[in-house]
Amino acid sequence: MRYLVAVILALLALPLAAQDWEDRQVFGAGDAAVTLRIVSSTDTDLFAPLIEGFVSANPDIAIEYLVTNTSDIDKRFRATPEAFDVAISSAMDLQLKLTNDGYAATLEGVTHPAWAQWRQSLFAFTSEPAAIVVNRAAFEGLAIPRTRQELIEILRAHPDRFRGRVGTYDVRQSGLGYLFATQDARASETFWRLMEIMGGLDVALYCCSGDMIDDLIAGRIAVAYNVLGSYAEARVAGDGPLDIILPSDFRTTMMRTALVSGDSPRPEAAERFVRALIAYTPEGAAAGGGRSLPPLAVEDPGADRATIPLGPALMTFLDALKRDKFLEEWENAVVQD
Amino acid sequence: MQDNPKVSGSLRKRLVLTLIGGAALLAFLLFLAVRNFAVQVAQQGQDNILFASASSMLDAASLRDGVVEVDLPYSAFAMLTTPADDRVFYAIYEDGTFLSGYDDLPFFGSLDDDRPRYRTAQMRGATVRQISAHRTLIGANRRINLQIVLAQTQDALSETLDRIFRTAALLGVSFFALAAAMSLWVTSSTMGQLNRLTTSVTRRGPQDLSPFRNPVPQEMAPLVKSLNSLMGRLDHSLSQSEDFIAEAAHRVRTPLATVRSYAEATLQRVDKEENREAMRSMIKAIDESSRTAGQLLDHAMITFRADQMERREFDLVELLRELVLQLAPIAEMKDLALNLHGAPSVPYAGDPILIQNAVRNLIDNAMKYGPAESAVDITVTAGPPVRITVCDEGPGFPADEIDRLTTRFARGQNAEGKVGSGLGLTIAQDVAGAHGGSIELSNREEGGACVTLLL
Ligand SMILES: Nc1ncnc2c1ncn2[C@@H]1O[C@H](COP(=O)(O)OP(=O)(O)OP(=O)(O)O)[C@@H](O)[C@H]1O
Ligand SMILES: [Mg+2]
């Protein structure tokens, strides 16, 4: 009787739950002993090879993979930390604050370089640079820009060609977009000049890298700034219509991070999953057949300053006052009515 | 003589215990001092960084159009990065109203002065160090007090402190080990001085009562001084008693000799048989007394020399030959032959005066208890042990008394009518004992007594 009720409840809840999430998928055998609830900002198709590898190696664990944007992960996780086992997000700052606020469990004896983990609780497992992605067709007769400055000059020289055809993150919605923007702003004034130019060209604002790349491929926009290069590469194998440019003036590289919920009901399985993530290697990435995430850089990024360091400084731009001020400035530059 | 002194406590133990106990105490104090100092320094370090961070936050605040703006510098949090990834919490208040950060972090400073306040408190299940600081912003028509509270966990601090504690403990232990080793060394070298004095006292010859001249540490000088003065007095009283013995011998023997010569002279002049008999008894008693006095003094002299025995190299055969020569006149009176047998020379280290005295007593017995016109055989054989045997052709020792004849004043039944004191064999035995040897009495099968000195 109780079983029946549970099944009915589950059936009722399923469509509801599915509606709540951008995507929801279950991996692994139906009779697995435990089902891990993983909330993530990574598109399912990019993450699937990794999860499939894990569930085939651990048949006793099934995985319910829930996708939503980074700000939403933070919100939901804070509201019900016991409802999730693992949180995976590209917004390093939000993840770090979750850890700082005590939502993450400490995993003992994980060997991971100090720069790629924080408090043995938050673990980075990819290195993904922000890129300028252009539709080659739209740049007919123009040199492909290699730096932000070159991009500014091209946009300024051909306003008619690019009006309404530039895109970037809406940093008000996207946690990753906000992270990239704040780090860019910290690195150079060029960022603000680029935003002003783009604002003047009626920039299209996006919630996610995926949508931006869709529009680029479709030719609706000609250039997108601060797209995840990893997503673009995953979408266009070899010589597609897109050019992915890692700006040579300075780079902003994000590390995707994972944490085990401190209130996880299945801590052991969750820890196993995170350990498997950490073990994610270039060889594993190659085996994924191209459509997978780039692995963690092997070397300490301390010297090149491109990779955003995992540390309390990430909390700076999450401060309510600081955030308001930054968004105000950003809106002034970008949203020009 | 070998009286063991009463022992109470041990200087060595007392020294070692005091020194090592002191070292342990010092090591522990050292550890505590280093530890406290480290805690202070480390806490001061964290406080300084918290202060710098809070100051940079306050500095970034401004009033624009009457509204507070806090443009948190990236470095404010960046400088709070620690190797242990310490957690950071902060809160910003405007005149006590929460603006941003963590609202479970209340302001605890004082608005009366500008000094920041620090405290250690529990927050979200961790021990955190907190700083409260504030700043007054003055605008065109407003004054606003901006307060900042910053908190940081102490993981890196405690890791550092753990390291320092381990180092401090190691320091303390090595200090203790060094101090303990040094105190053992100091103790044994101090005790060594005492031991050296002890050995030099023990090694001294029996008659060496001269003062100690070797240098000793200042603290031992009084001891050596009293020792020297004690030995001086001992030396003095010993030589006095030696003199006393010689004096007594002289004083007893001389008058006895005088009395005897008078008695003998009187005997010549007395005709009445019963008076003559009385005179003879008198002379015999005088001889007896004289003999006893002589033997007593000899015995006393021997006891004294044996106590202070001084060995020296000499030839036994030569000594005995001289003795035989000395005794020859007495032997002739009894028509006795004194025959010396054995090796031509037997070197020996001992006291010749004592040995001569002992053998004289033995020969004396042989002549006294042996028959006239017989021979006394004196044999020397080289050792070890060196043997000197004196045999006669008399009736031998009374068999039932042979075991007690060496005791003091013991005389056999066969001594009836013979002048003697019963000290001769005692003297011989004491002399043998003083040389680490013994005496053996036996009767020869063909008749006659044999006494052997084993040296
Ligand atoms: N050569 C001997 N033959 C037989 N008996 C002996 C002989 N020497 C010693 N004795 C016995 O041993 C006893 C002890 O001898 P010892 O020399 O000690 O004393 P002493 O001869 O009687 O007196 P003195 O002190 O004058 O020598 C003697 O009294 C005697 O009985
Ligand atoms: Mg005798």
Image: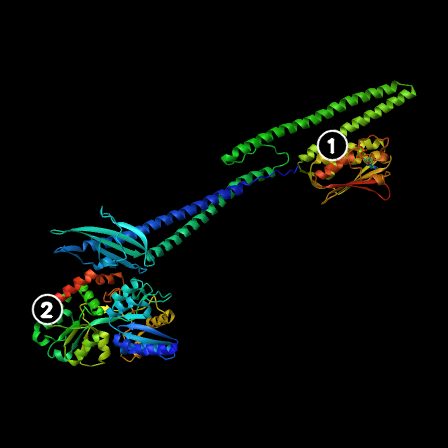
The one nearer the camera, B127 or A265, is A265
Q: Chain of mark 1?
A: B
Q: Quadrant of the N terminus of chain B?
A: top right
* Residue pictured at 36% horizontal, 69% vertical: A265
Residue B70: x and y, percent? Answer: 18, 57
In the picture, the disc for residue A336 is 2
Residue B454 visible to the viewer: no
Q: In the rendered view, does A33 fall on the left or right side of B428?
A: left
The one nearer the camera, B383 or B432, is B432
Please determine if labels 1 and 2 lie on a single subunit.
Answer: no
Classify mark 1: residues with Cα within 10 Å, few (<14), some (14-19) or many (20+): many
The one nearer the camera, B311 or A8, is A8
Residue B203 vs A78, above or below: the answer is above
Q: Quadrant of the C terminus of chain B?
A: top right
Residue B106 vs A66, above or below: the answer is above
Q: Is mark 1 within 8 Å of ligand 1?
A: no
- Residue B299 sits in quarter: top right
Q: Chain of mark 2?
A: A
Read off the residue under disc 1: B299
Task: Kindly report the distance in space between the C-alpha atoms of the residues bearing marks 1 and 2.
Answer: 140 Å
- Say what amino acid the circle numbered 1 marks: His
- Say what amino acid the circle numbered 2 marks: Gln
In the picture, the disc for residue B277 is none
Q: SS of the residue at dot 2?
A: loop
* Residue pictured at 16% horizontal, 55% vertical: B62
Residue A151: x and y, percent? Answer: 13, 71
